[in-house]
Image (tube, rainbow, N blue to C red):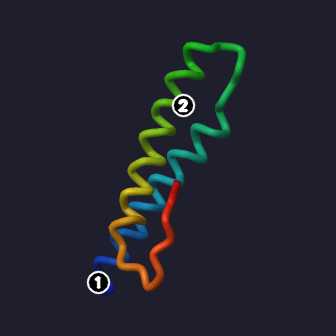
Amino acid sequence: MTHFETARVNEMLGLQIGVIKDIASKLNGDDLEQLERDLIVMGDSVKEARSMVESLPHRHKASLP
């Protein structure tokens, strides 16, 4: 992977992590419907971040649950 590709993946991961942190800071159990919507968006962001990490070349591949 080139330096440019690595920088781009790091940037995209940073964006996904930002989305996750933003949603996590706003979670509120008072409105269960909103909580469910927020958790769906957060779950999608986690899946996207995991996909990016899994696509990276790793020296030692660890299996993720």
Quarter residue 1 falls in: bottom left
User: In the image, residue 18 lies at what x, y percent?
Assistant: 53, 52
Distance CA(mark 1)–CA(mark 2): 33 Å
Question: Does 21 appear above or below 37?
Answer: below
Say which mark, if any, is on residue 39: 2
User: In the image, residue 49 lies at what x, y percent?
Assistant: 43, 55
Question: Does 18 appear above or below 37?
Answer: below
Q: Residue at x 29, y 81 (%)?
A: 4
Structural crowding at the residue carrying mark 1, measured as other residues with C-alpha within 10 Å and reported as few (<14), some (14–19) or many (≥20) = few
Quarter residue 36 falls in: top right
Amino acid carrying mark 1 in the image = Met
Structural crowding at the residue carrying mark 2, measured as other residues with C-alpha within 10 Å and reported as few (<14), some (14–19) or many (≥20) = some
Look at mark 1 in the image and give the residue it sits on: 1
21 or 36: nearer the viewer: 36
User: In the image, residue 46 lies at what x, y percent?
Assistant: 48, 48
Quarter residue 6 falls in: bottom left
Question: Does 17 appear above or below 59?
Answer: above
Q: Residue at x 33, y 86 (%)?
A: 3
Q: Secondary structure at mark 1?
A: loop
Q: Is residue 32 left or right of residue 3?
A: right
Question: Does 17 appear above or below 28?
Answer: below
Amino acid carrying mark 2 in the image = Leu
Q: Secondary structure at mark 2?
A: helix
